[in-house]
Image: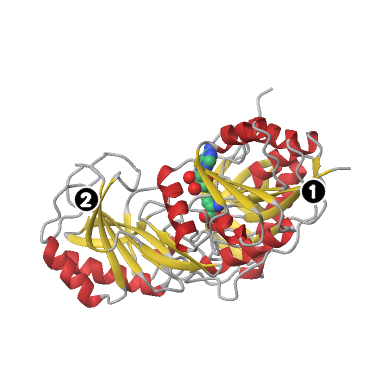
């Protein structure tokens, strides 16, 4: 049956927005045909221009908002809105938190699973939270600029105030930009694949205030290296490490494999959960320290650990969760796929004088099977997988181990709900409300903690 498409490209329509997608687009329907609209919120009456028509849906642009949502707030500034940095910035923060809670409920409903979801734990100040920035450097009208990409493109929009980043990081980016300008360093050009500097990465310890500057270059050579280093160190006293990362490839991937320490240490140290963590340029480290501590405390509390417990931390990264709970249990086994992260984890155990953790480089799904076959009997398993969620074989291995509970830290409710369905088939249920914690205010990312227990 051919579906009648009730809208046409480049035509205007008056619509009522009834929903918000997981990407933060407003949804309106004409004769049941969905249209996705940027910068439009539920309850709003909007005049739209249809920009793209597909078989089962269309995209539109809001030309005029005829009736505003009570949850609409003034966006930060025009240039900023053109980027994808803060796609929910036009939605009031309490509504953002409710949007995230609702997202989880929606995804579980789709799986026909009945769960409760607690109100999202938010931030008192839902901005200036990121401890890390990755800033593209490009030539614009003959001038080296830093900023961010315009939505759906690789055109740079110059930005100095990134709003969701630590303001000290914003200041550092501007200072480094001006130093690069002064020494006439050529920015990378994606079209010709020429130029020197591709990106500036800055990390700043939330507690330690130690700063790391990574200059990501296309070329091996950084002209005026000595001058750039001395000006950076003079102007930014918090800098403890300057690293050049060489990425000669013609790809979208940000960092290359080669790091050259130009000045100071090759790492910075920060504290999390009262522990010291050394962080190297390529390692994953949670970007919102305030909310991460809330998330970890909650995960640990929900794990109801005893001093004789054996715990597996799957997808352990640099060991932040493993080391946070090592003190209160007998033994922790961590598994992670990135070798450098496991090196960091081992070093971090040593720095914190923790000796009851064992870290393994492997795919979590394979290692859990090995541990299960070797007769390892964990009391609790914590999983913190990337967006794609758990491998089915991991869930099967877990089902073979008779644990008390599994704590699932999720950054994607769709895969969480999919995995919950499989857990249910293996007799693991959710008996308490899922707890969302807002790790990424102003964005559409939804992080949560769920407890799975074997039904008796
Ligand atoms: N728990 C850590 C890291 C979470 S991010 C923290 O809170 O800091 C998810 C981690 O899973 C990343 O470090 C990534 O490298 C790792 N990873 C991705 N796929 C994996 C797999 N199949 N097996 C093990 N680790 C994996």
- The relative height of residue 89 versus residue 51 in the rendered view (above or below) is below
- Cβ of mark 2 under 8 A from ligand 1: no
- Quarter holding the N terminus? top right
Q: Would residue 345 be visible to someone looking at this image? A: yes
- The relative height of residue 418 versus residue 324 in the rendered view (above or below) is above
Query: Few, some or many C-alpha atoms within 10 Å of disc 2 (few <14, some 14-19, many ≥20)?
Result: many
| Residue placed most toward the observer, 24 or 101 | 101
| Residue placed most toward the observer, 110 or 357 | 357
Q: Residue at x 29, y 71 (%)?
A: 239
**Image-based side of 218 in relation to 160, left or right:** left
Query: In which image quadrant can residue 43 be found?
Result: bottom right
Residue hosting label 1: 430
Query: In which image quadrant can residue 253 be found?
Result: top left
Q: Residue 272 location in percent, x, y?
A: 52, 66
**Image-based side of 133 in relation to 225, left or right:** right
Q: Give the Cα distance between marks 1 and 2.
A: 50 Å
**Image-based side of 450 in relation to 360, left or right:** right
Q: Residue at x 73, y 64 (%)?
A: 119
Residue hosting label 2: 188
């Amino acid at each position: 049956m051919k579906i009648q498409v009730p809208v046409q490209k480049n035509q205007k329509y008056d619509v009522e927005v009834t929903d918000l997608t997981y990407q933060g687009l407003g949804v309106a329907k004409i004769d049941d045909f969905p249209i996705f609209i940027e910068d439009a919120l539920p309850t709003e009456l909007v005049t739209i221009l249809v920009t793209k028509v597909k078989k089962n849906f269309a995209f539109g642009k809001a030309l005029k908002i005829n009736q505003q949502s009570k949850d609409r707030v003034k966006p930060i500034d025009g240039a900023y809105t053109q980027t994808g940095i803060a796609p929910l910035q036009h939605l009031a923060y309490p509504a953002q938190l409710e949007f995230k809670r609702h997202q989880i409920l929606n995804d579980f409903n789709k799986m026909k699973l009945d769960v409760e979801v607690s109100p999202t734990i938010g931030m008192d100040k839902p901005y200036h939270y990121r401890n890390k920035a990755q800033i593209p450097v490009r030539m614009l009208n003959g001038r080296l600029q830093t900023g961010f990409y315009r939505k759906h493109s690789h055109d740079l929009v110059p930005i100095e105030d990134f709003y969701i980043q630590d303001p000290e990081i914003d200041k550092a980016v501007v200072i480094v930009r001006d130093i690069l300008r002064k020494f006439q360093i050529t920015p990378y050009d994606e079209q010709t694949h020429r130029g020197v500097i591709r990106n500036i990465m800055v990390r700043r310890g939330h507690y330690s205030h130690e700063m790391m500057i990574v200059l990501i270059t296309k070329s091996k050579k950084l002209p005026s290296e000595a001058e750039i280093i001395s000006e950076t160190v003079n102007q930014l006293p918090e800098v403890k490490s300057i690293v050049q990362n060489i990425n000669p490839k013609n790809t979208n991937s940000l960092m290359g494999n080669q790091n050259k320490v130009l000045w100071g240490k090759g790492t910075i140290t920060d504290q999390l959960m009262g522990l010291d963590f050394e962080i190297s340029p390529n390692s994953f480290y949670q970007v919102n320290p305030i909310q991460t501590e809330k998330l970890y405390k909650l995960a640990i509390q929900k794990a109801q650990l005893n001093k004789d417990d054996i715990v597996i931390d799957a997808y352990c990264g640099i060991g932040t969760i493993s080391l946070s709970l090592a003190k209160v249990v007998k033994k922790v086994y961590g598994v992670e796929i990135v070798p450098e992260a496991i090196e960091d984890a081992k070093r971090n155990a040593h720095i914190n004088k923790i000796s009851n953790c064992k870290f393994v480089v492997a795919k979590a799904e394979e290692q859990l099977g090995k541990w299960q076959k070797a007769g390892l009997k964990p009391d609790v398993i914590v999983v913190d997988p990337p967006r794609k969620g758990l491998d089915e074989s991991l869930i099967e291995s877990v089902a073979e181990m008779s644990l008390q509970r599994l704590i699932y830290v999720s950054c994607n409710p769709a895969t969480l709900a999919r995995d919950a369905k499989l857990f249910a088939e293996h007799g693991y249920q959710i008996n308490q409300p899922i707890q969302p914690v807002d790790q990424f205010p102003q964005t559409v990312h939804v992080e949560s903690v769920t407890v799975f227990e074997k039904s008796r």
